Amino acid sequence: MSLKIFFVLHFLFLFLFLPKLVYSKSLVVLNFENKTAKSSLDFFSFLIPETINHVVTKDQVIDSLEREKLGEILKEAELQQSGLIDLKVLEKIKLLKADFLVFGFYQETVESEIKKISINMRIVEVSSGKIIFSDNIAGDLSEIFSKIESSTTKMLALIKGEELVPLNVFSYPIGAKVYLDGILVGKTPLFNYPVSKGRAEIILLKDNYQKHTQELIVDSSKKINLEINLFIQKQFDFSLGYYYFRNLTLDLEENFLLGVRVGYRFSSWQINLEYLNSLAESENSYYYEVPYDQQEDQRDYIFQAANLSFVYYPLKKESKIFPYCGLTAGYWSFWEKNINYEFFGRDEDRLNSISWGLLTGIKILPSTNASLFFEFRYLGSLIKAEREVVDRIDFGLLNKKKEKMDFSALMFGGGFSLNIDWRN
């Protein structure tokens, strides 16, 4: 055997077996007593110990004695369960070199018309006969076994003498399930949950919200307070907005636009379809030459637009005031009115333009069913609109020309949004 292989095997031996050699403790888990009158719940009697043993077997320090080898001792102990264990039974268990005995009972309870299983778990130190740990847990079938695992983890930390640090977890919104190293430990707000020093993975799950995962580092005995903001997972966003519109390049009268928007949000992105319509007409005039003078031609414009926008939410944690930014592009249509019928044979026309734009804004209370938003936009003309105008009138001769219109503008406004879960 080469020296390298020797050192590898030596290291593996120390890593796997040294903790048990230095501090080796063992425990026995009894079947839990069914205190309900329902035989249909008898399966919990052995499923609870199996769940406890499943957690214990992962521990490098504590051993769980195989229940199949305990025979009559376990039967005698279970017959005497009444909240206490007979000392004669403890003496027999002590002969098996078991240091701790785990036992308890369960019953069915009803909370808000939901049936739950309530479990009382106790640990007795075999050498003294004293109960050193007691825990009461309750939950429905979807969560009760995770809670048993959580309680067992606390029990093992106590047995090994580890210092436990209280953990508080708050989330916005509340009601998120909290998992510590894959074990469900409760829902937010979670108060004074004991955790041992070291590193752990904490996960928060809530329907309609993104999964939140972070590493928890416990290196002191001070209480830990976690405040976590959850992202909405996927939702439709229906918004109604009111905007101030100011053109930057034309002598075009300012206006106000009403906007209706439908958005679909996924993760940190949102895609929106939007319709905008001006609430009044905007005036714009131009001048053309006539012999020895100038003449004014006044026109009015009504705006309509269909936009597609992509919005990005840069923050990793959602808060009550949440910024965003994005790009927009759209088709703008302009009703042009009061055209000189004598010259053009019509009194209105429709102009078309393709726009692009930048937007930025904030949403207030984005995780609620209804939220507010305030937004600023810059719009540029990607394809400019064309209108027909009079160039000059020279002694009865009419000259017309095409004129491009740059509808670059600033928009500022706000409104409210209804946030609708896509699965409802």
Image (cartoon, rainbow, N blue to C red):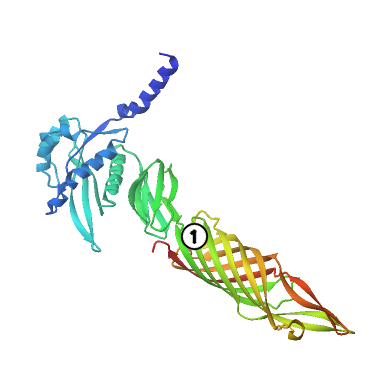
Q: Residue at (21%, 49%) from the top-left corner?
A: 120
Quick one: 211 or 332, which is closer to the camera?
332
Quick one: 269 or 62, which is closer to the camera?
269
Residue 172, quarter of the rendered image: bottom left
| Location of residue 41 with respect to 344 vertically, above or below | above
Image x and y of residue 394, in percent: 88, 82
Crowding around mark 1 (Cα neighbors within 10 Å: few <14, some 14 to 19, many 20+) is many
Q: Residue at (38%, 25%) from the top-left corner?
A: 12
Image x and y of residue 369, in percent: 44, 67
210 left or right of 21 in image: right
Count every numbered label the image shows and give the total.
Answer: 1
Q: Residue at (51%, 53%) from the top-left corner?
A: 316
Quick one: 261 or 194, which is closer to the camera?
261
Image x and y of residue 136, in percent: 24, 51
382 left or right of 219 in image: right
Q: Please, which residue is most extreme toward the top here?
A: 1
Determine which residue is flagged by label 1. Answer: 265
Q: Is residue 206 visible?
A: yes
Image x and y of residue 368, in percent: 44, 65
Q: Residue at (39%, 61%) from the top-left corner?
A: 423
Image quadrant holding the N terminus, namely top left
| Location of residue 338 with respect to 237 vertically, above or below | below
Kindly identify the amino acid type of the residue bearing the numbered disc 1: Arg
Residue 49, quarter of the rendered image: top left
| Location of residue 265 with respect to 193 vertically, above or below | below
Image quadrant holding the C terminus, namely bottom left
Q: Secondary structure at mark 1?
A: strand
Q: Is residue 223 visible?
A: no
